[in-house]
Image (spheres, rainbow, N blue to C red):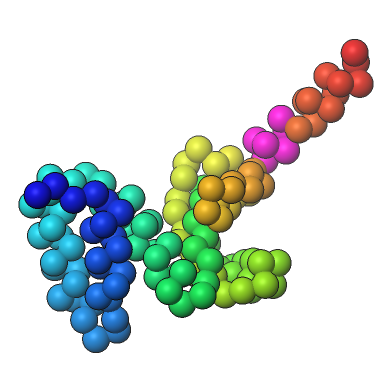
Amino acid sequence: MKRTLESISQEVSDRLSDSNVAVVSRQLWWQLQKQKKFGQLDKVIELIEQKQAEKHNCVSVIINSVIELNDADKEKLGKKLEKKLGQKIIARYRIDPKVLGGMKIQIGDTIFDLTLKDKIEQIKAKLRGSNE
């Protein structure tokens, strides 16, 4: 029987604990192979993170930057986000070569574009508006 990514990630999230990470990881690997969905591993991990965040009363956050942030920057950013959101976060950091300075922060379906490219686009839009 074919299973959805949602149902696979829900089962993994429900069964996951500190003591059984290796076992659950192997079972996830097997389930994705069996369902021919291994190419969607990133999406499954994202769904599991969201479910774990909900389970622990946290917010799942994806942070994209052009370079790897060091541990001190990650901690500082995490604390700022927790203060702004008013709750704990589970952060996933990604390197994205398309981000040209700054970062993009995704919280659920909302994306905060804090990139240099976006700032330049905002300035261009303001200049176009003042020339009309």
In magenta, the rendered stretch is 116-121
Q: Is residue 91 above or below residue 18?
A: above
Q: Position of residue 103 (x, y in %)?
A: 59, 50
Q: Is residue 40 left or right of residue 53?
A: left
Q: Is residue 49 above or below residue 107?
A: below
Q: Is residue 88 left or right of residue 49?
A: right
Q: Nearer the viewer, residue 18 or 73?
A: 18
Q: Position of residue 15 (x, y in %)?
A: 25, 75
Q: Position of residue 124 (x, y in %)?
A: 78, 25
The kind of secondary structure the magenta stretch mainly shows is: helix
What residue is drawn where x is 31% and y is 69%? Answer: 13
Instruction: Name the quarter where the C terminus is drawn.
Output: top right
The quarter of the picture where residue 7 lies is bottom left
What residue is drawn where x is 24% and y is 86%? Answer: 19
Q: Is residue 9 above or below residue 15?
A: above
Q: Nearer the viewer, residue 113 or 102?
A: 113
Q: Residue furthest top?
A: 132
Q: Residue furthest front?
A: 1
For residue 65, say whether it is visible: no
Q: Is residue 43 above or below residue 49?
A: above
What residue is drawn where x is 30% and y is 63%? Answer: 10
For residue 124, say whether it is visible: yes
Asked if residue 120 is among those painted magenta in the image, a careful observer would answer yes
Q: Position of residue 64 (x, y in %)?
A: 51, 51
How many dots with numbers? 0
Q: Residue furthest bottom?
A: 19
